[in-house]
Structures are given as C-alpha cells and as structure tokens.
Image (cartoon, rainbow, N blue to C red):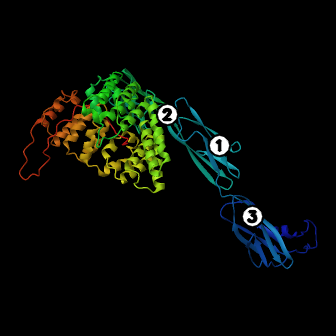
Amino acid sequence: MERASVLAAAIGVATAAAGCETEPPVAAPQRFGVAVAEPRGERIVGQTVRVHGYVVGGQASEVRVGDLPATVDPGGHFEASVPVGEDGPRRLPVVAKGPAGEVRSEAAWVADNTPPLVTIESPAPDEVFTREAAAVEIRGRVEDGSPVSLAADGRPVALDGTRFLLPVMLGEGERTVRLVARDAAGHESAVAVKISRDTTPPSVALGEVPAEVRRPEVPVQGTLSEAGCRVFANGIGARVDGVSFEVTVPLDEGENAIAIVARDAAGNEGSAAAKVLYRLPDPPSEEIVIETLRRQIVGDGGGWYEGQYRHLLDYGPAIRPIILEVVRKVLTGNDRSLAPLQTHAVQMLGDLNMTEGAALLREILTTYQLPPDFRNEVAFIMSRLGDSEEADKILADYRKGLDGTPQQKANAWTQLGNAYARMNNFRESRDCYLKHIQVLAEAKLPPRPSSIVYYNLACQHAKLGDKDLAIAALQKCMELGYTGLEWMAMDGDLASLRSDQRFQDMLAEKATPRQLLARAKNVFDRTHPEPCRKLLEKVVAQDPSLGEAWIYLAQAKAFEGNQDGAIEALEKAVEAGWRDKAGTLGDTEAFKRVRANPRFQAAVAAVQAPLPPKEEGQPPGEEKQDVPPPDGGEGGGGGGGGS
C-alpha cells in the first residue's frame, strides 16, 4: 500500500474536489496515529510474518507488535518480524507511544502451513478386482482450511464440498492414478492409488501324493503359479509360504478324494485333485503293543504325555480288544519282565480314552493289593475314563496337607499338581505347581523346588499355549540340574515349543551328534517316523560320517514313502563306510518297494562288501560295523510329563 493512502486512512487527510478550485487545498490538522500496511487479512505461508506500517502526527517513542518491539525509522515507518502461529486466523495489536499518549491498530492474517489432506475411502489398499469389474470408482475426501482444487493425472476432478468421486476404467494388470490436491496457499498433496484387475486363476501343481497309505492322514504339498493365495484341501486351510503350500488331510477308511482349491487376492480360483486309498494296517500282535510300551521307558523310566499312544488308533477298532488284553496281561500276569510296564499300560488306556477299560481297572483295583502310588495312578486314569469315585477320595486326602506346616503344604500342592496332570486337568495342575513354588519361597524353606516341579510346570504351560512361560520354566528346570534332554526332546507335552529357537538351543547346548542319534533311535517308529527323521537329518548335517545315522534315516524316509530319499540316504551310508555285517539289509521291511531298483541293489551290494584295508599310516577309523535297526517295532514318538 502506498504511504499516502496509508496516511489518508490513518488521519483523514482532506483533499480538494477535482474541478475549478483556484485556492490550494487546506490540510486538516494532523493527529498522532499508527496504520498497518501489511498484513491485512491475507494468507501467510512460513514461520514468520513481516508486519509494517507508519506512524504520523508526531514522533513515536515506541512501537510494539504484540509483545515484540518494532523498529521505527525517522520517516515514521515501522516493521517487525513475528511468528505466524498455528494455522487459522491470527490478530496482533500494534501499539505506538508518543507525546499524545498511545494509539492502536491491528495486524491480521491467516496462517496456512498445512497442505490439504487427501483421504481415499475406496478402493481398499491392494484391492484386486476380478473380470466382472469393468470400471472402479475412486471415492474420497479433500480437506483444507482454504479453497482447494483436485486433479487426477493432470485432469481436473470435480469436488462436491470436500468429497469427490472419480470413475476409472479397468484393464488387465495394474495401473496407478495420481491425485494431486492444491490449496489457496499453493500447498500440494499427492496420493497414488493403485488399481489392479486380475482375471487369471492361479494354477496348482501337486507334489507326489501316495496312492495308498496306512495312516488316517496324508501330507499334501504343492506349488502355485502366484504368491498371495489362500489354499484349502477338502476345506482345510493349508500353510502357504510364497508359492509353496503344505497341509495334512485326514482320511476315512477306503478311497478318499482330495480337492485342492487355491484362491488369489482377486477371488480367482484354481484347483487340483488327487485320490488316496486308506487301508487300515493289519492289527499288531500283543507282542508289538508290549514293545510299544517298552519303547517309552527312557532313562529312569521316562514319563507320559497326551497323545503318547495315539498312533495305535491308526489300526482301527481291531486294536482295542488287543490293547485290553495286553493291559490285563501286564497288570495281572506272572511275567516279571512286564512289571516295569504297568504304569505305562494304565496310562495307555487313558491316553486312548478307552472307556471300556474302566471296568478292567475297577476289577484290578478291587481284586489285587496294589502299591499305594500305583493304586493312585490307576484311580486317576479311571477318572479320565469316567469313574472318578476313587480319584475324588485321593484328592480329598491330598488336600488335608494344605492345613499343615509350610513343608506339608508344599508337598500337598505337588501331589495335587501331579494328580490333576494325570487327569488331564492342565490348568488346575499348573496352578498347583505354582502354589508349591510360592509356599516354599514365602517360608524360605530348603530345599528349593526340584527341577521336576519346574519341568512339569513347563509342560502345563506348553499345553495351555503359554510358550514364554513354558520356556522360562524349562530354563529354571535346567538351572536346577535337569539332565533328561533325551526325554525333553521326545516329550509330546512340549510339542508346541519345538519350533522355538530357545527350546532348540536348550537341546543343542549339550547334545552331541551321537547323543542325538541315540535319541532318534529311541523314537524310531515306522508308523510315525517324522520325529525320528527330523532328528536324524540334524545328526547327519552335523556329522556326515555316522553311517548308522544314514541307515536309520534311509528307513525313516522309506516308511514315509520317500523312496528316492531313502536310496540317497543308503548311498550316503555306503560313502560313510557303513557295512551290513549281518547281511539282512536287503530284506528289511522298509525297503520292500524298492528292492527291484538297480540303485538300491547296488547300494546293498556295496554295504555287504568288506571294507578296503587301511593304508599304512592311515589314522584308525570307526571299526564298529552296525546292523540295521529293527523293522519298525510299533514304538512311541515324543515324550513328556516327566512327572
């Protein structure tokens, strides 16, 4: 603004009317005043604003803009730089002091340092449209304190208040629409909207699916033509990793159709199919069931866990009377070699939920004089099978100890924890073990809780899904001297921890390849070879020279149906110097389907050939010649409980 107009606005200078005046105009008397030239309501971008104007009618001793002093030159011009402030209308008083006192004016502006906000309401991010969609509407809002404009790829887009709707035609593949909003202050905001149309269904390539199995489930693996799909096998969700998937499909006896459906992000579906025949295996003999029990005796007797004997159900209903007869023979027979199996035999009835076994246990409980601990075990399993009368009496007797000394309370909580664990009441069992630890801690009583209490506590945490608490309890258990790593690796109660690196580190900390091999041999089971196979793969990765490990691995893979993998492992055993001194490898049950394979025959010939003589000066090697493991006696799998 020109100074003359500012002064006129401030003090009202009189001017002569245009026309025929012959006398010069007479100025009105000047008054002391102050006028703001800028800002006068305009939008300001930046952190500071320059406020300036003029003082007339006298000399100002001071000019302040808000709380800040302004500079004033001899001509009366003042200016000051002040903060713009938060977005929105701003006003500051301008005060000049002079001989006639104070005069006031005001600086006003609109602070605008925020670009417009563009919000996309649809389509959703990463949304992919199918062949049915020929066009899509981009909907959203543009918000700002000033008038705004919107353009899509440089073309104007109409706004209805703050809202907009932009139709976009679709083609196959992906395109990006760039929306740019600009406000009155010149700020811009840009948003890129990706729009995809996918009309191509994913293709599914199945891996090898066995035509016939002897288990009530079959693993199915495959690959997809694109990532980001969901995969279902007979309605069961598969685990998908990139373009690979795997799923275990339950089977009914007889022929089963397996339908694989892959659905991509656009809803396009691809499919594949397979057929699998599930034949129940021939019922095992009583001797094999007894061998199953023997295989669970690990270290000082091992323990038991949920699912320990579940694989026996793979034989179908025909196995149930055999199991009952084995339990009767173990509990009532005169064969002393079966005595160590008694507790496991009772546990087997509970694990398989064989309610028909409750009558047998009741008969034994009332007919025979049983040791107290074993009698309690029978009662707890009877409770799982629906007969809880005896278990209730025992629990009531345990609870009497809760009224005793701190040591008696601690012992009672342990007894209750063990009892509830046998009865599959995991939550009650966990709480009892925690009470045991708490009582000893509060009473400051020696000894500290044993490693077994912490082990059992870890099992209950794991079964309840509390992985971090389970790992912490196991770490405490090992600090207290627990050494049963062999059982810990088998324990099915800890199955949820096996993929946890912390758990793997605990096992690996002290386990040598030979210890891992011993552990694998303990869990070898042809009806469920996966735990053994995984351990053996770890063994040969650490020490490829262990020929016995390669032989076990060959059989585990063979029992899983991976015949090529079995032959490759057998060839590795040959390279490691393993020899079949007994000459029975060719007749091993695991390899019956590949006996006609030339590679298999060559490997058998190689392991039955004598080792070449050592050269003079050659370091001594492993002289022991292994024999093949048994043809998969129906052993157990993992382990647990420890209680």
Q: Which of marks 1 and 2 is in front?
A: 2
Q: Quadrant of the C terminus?
A: top left
Q: Seen in the image, is 641 located left or right of residue 580?
A: right
Residue at image position (32%, 46%) is 484
What amino acid is found at the position of numbered circle 2 in the picture? Answer: Asp
The nearer-to-camera label among 3 and 2 is: 2
Position in image of residue 136 (x %, y %): 58, 35
Residue at mark 1: 157
Residue 152 picture location, percent across and down? 60, 44
Of pointers 3 and 2, the one earlier in the residue sequence: 3
The residue that appears at 43% across and 40% down in the rendered structure is 463
Q: In this view, does 463 lie above or below 22?
A: above
In this rendering, position of residue 79 left or right of residue 353: right
- Residue position marked by numbered label 3 in the rendering: 39
Under circle 3, the secondary element is loop
Residue 395 percent coordinates (x, y): 46, 38
